[in-house]
Image (tube, rainbow, N blue to C red):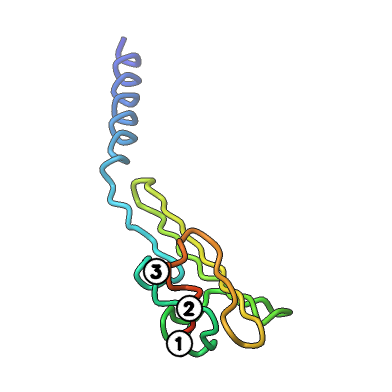
Amino acid sequence: MKAVIQNLIVILALASVSACSSWVYRIDIPQGNFLEQKDIDKLRIAMTKEQVKYVLGSPVAKNAFDDDTWHYFYALRGGRGNDFEKQLIVEFKDDKLADIKGDFAKSDNFNTPLDI
C-alpha cells in the first residue's frame, strides 16, 4: 500500500512539472530584413542597386553566380508558435531595377521611373 502511494505521488509530481512547461516564457526570434509595404511602395523601375539598398537595406542573400537577383527574407519564430514569414525577390537588369516578386504588392507607380 505504501509503495502505491509513493508511486502515485511521483506520478502526480511529474505530471505537475510537465504542466508547468506552458508557463515558461519563450522569446520571439526575428531573422532577416523586416520590410513593410510602405518600403516596397518606394521602389521604382530603373532604380540603381544603391538606391534599392538605401530603401530596403542590404539583402539577406545574393546569388553568388548572379549578382542581379537579391533575396530579402524575414521570419519571426514566435515563442508561442505564432510564426510569420515574408519574402521579396528583387531582380536587376544592367544594374537597374527590373522587377520584384514575392509576398508584397507592386505599387501603382512601380513602372514609372524616378526621373520622369
Q: Residue 82, how many percent across, how many down? A: 37, 47
* Rendered image: mark on residue 34: 3
Q: Say what secondary structure mark 1 lies in.
A: loop
Q: Residues within 10 Å of mark 2 (few under 14, many from 20)?
A: few
Q: Residue 44, how many percent across, how many down? A: 47, 78
Task: Count the numbered circles shown.
Answer: 3
Residue at screen point 39% across, 64% down: 30
Instruction: Determine which residue is flagged by label 1.
Output: 116
Mark 3 or mark 1: name the one nearer the start of the chain. Answer: 3
Q: Is residue 83 above or below residue 66?
A: above
Residue that sits furthest to the right in the current view: 65
**Viewer-nearest of discs 3 and 1:** 1
**Viewer-nearest of discs 3 and 2:** 2
Residue that sits furthest to the left in the current view: 23
| Left or right: 35 as drawn, with respect to 73 | left
Q: Say what secondary structure mark 2 lies in.
A: loop
Q: Amino acid at mark 3?
A: Phe
The quarter of the picture where the N terminus appears is: top left
Q: Say what secondary structure mark 3 lies in.
A: loop
Q: Is residue 52 above or below residue 102?
A: below
Residue at screen point 59% across, 77% down: 98
Q: Are marks 2 and 1 in contact (CB under 8 Å)?
A: yes
Q: How far is the residue under mark 2 from the one under mark 1? A: 7 Å
- Where on the picture, by quarter, is residue 37? bottom left
- Where on the picture, by quarter, is residue 90? bottom right
- Where on the picture, by quarter, is residue 22? top left
Q: Are marks 3 and 2 in contact (CB under 8 Å)?
A: no
Viewer-closest of 19 and 9: 19
Instruction: Determine which residue is flagged by label 2.
Output: 112
Viewer-closest of 80 and 97: 97
Q: Amino acid at mark 2?
A: Thr
| Left or right: 4 as drawn, with respect to 43 | left
